Image (spheres, grey):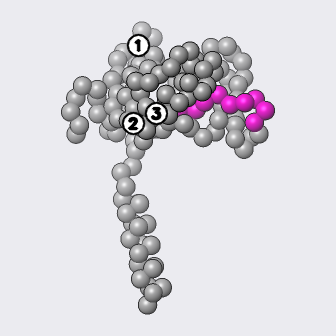
Amino acid sequence: MKTLCALAFCVVFAAAEGLAKQRHCTFRVHAQANARDTEVFATSVRAQLSGKTVAIEKMPWISERDVMAFSPYPAANGTYGALFQLDEHGRVVLDTLSVERRGRLLFVFINGRPITELEIDKRVSDGKIYVPSGLTSADIELMKKDWRMIGKRKR
């Protein structure tokens, strides 16, 4: 009987996990890694700023779960840019990264594509990440399904 109750309990939690809200858009921020890190922890990407190949950590520091809202705008090159507002967890992580990793790069990936790299030159404690360009109109439409627009009430 105990086994049957435990099994039912596990099934209920598995069903609840399956019903959790699925995200439409992915947002990942990876930090520059030590070049001597192994392939288990880091991977190589080409930096847009320098053109050099740099190592980035495989695990993102910030993800789409840390985004509360965003504000898109058309960029000069025909793409879109956006300002992302992070929740409290994301704000603390960004603040920590900006202090501990000063002089290094952060790489922003949206929907699996590298969008931009940001050089950490000062402390960022406001919880905002600015992506200057590189987003498509399809990206913006997917973002609207997941996050509210800055300045608008929560859905």
- Image quadrant of residue 117? top right
Looking at the image, which residue is at 39% across and 36% down? 88
Numbered circle sitting on residue 75: 1
Q: Is residue 48 magenta?
A: no
Residue 89 at x, y percent in the picture: 43, 38
Span highlighted in magenta in the image: 28-37
> Residue 66: where, in percent of width, then height?
42, 38
| Image quarter of the N terminus | bottom left
Packing grade of label 2 (10 A; few <14, some 14-19, many >=20) is some
Dot 2: element: helix
148 sits left or right of 87 in the view? left
Q: Position of residue 13 (x, y in %)?
A: 41, 67
The residue where tag 2 is placed is: 88
Residue type marked 2: Glu
Mark sitting on residue 92? 3
- Label 1 packing within 10 angstroms: few (<14), some (14-19), many (20+): some
Confirm whether residue 37 shows in the render.
Answer: yes
Q: What is the CA distance from the residue labelled 3 to the residue labelled 1?
A: 29 Å
Q: Residue furthest right?
A: 36
Type of secondary structure dominating the magenta stretch: loop
- Label 3, label 2: how far apart the Cα atoms are: 6 Å
Q: Nearer the viewer, residue 144 or 131?
A: 131
Total numbered circles: 3
Q: Check disc 1 and give the amino acid type.
A: Ala
Q: Residue at x 45, y 87 (%)?
A: 2
**What residue type is disc 3 on?**
Val
Determine the residue located farthest toward the top in the rendered image: 76
Q: For marks 1 and 2, give the CA distance.
A: 28 Å
- For label 3, the crowd category at 10 Å Cα-Cα, with few meaning under 14, some 14 to 19 and many 20 or more, is some
- Disc sitting over residue 135 in the figure: none
Tell which tag, 3 or 1, sits nearer the viewer. Answer: 3
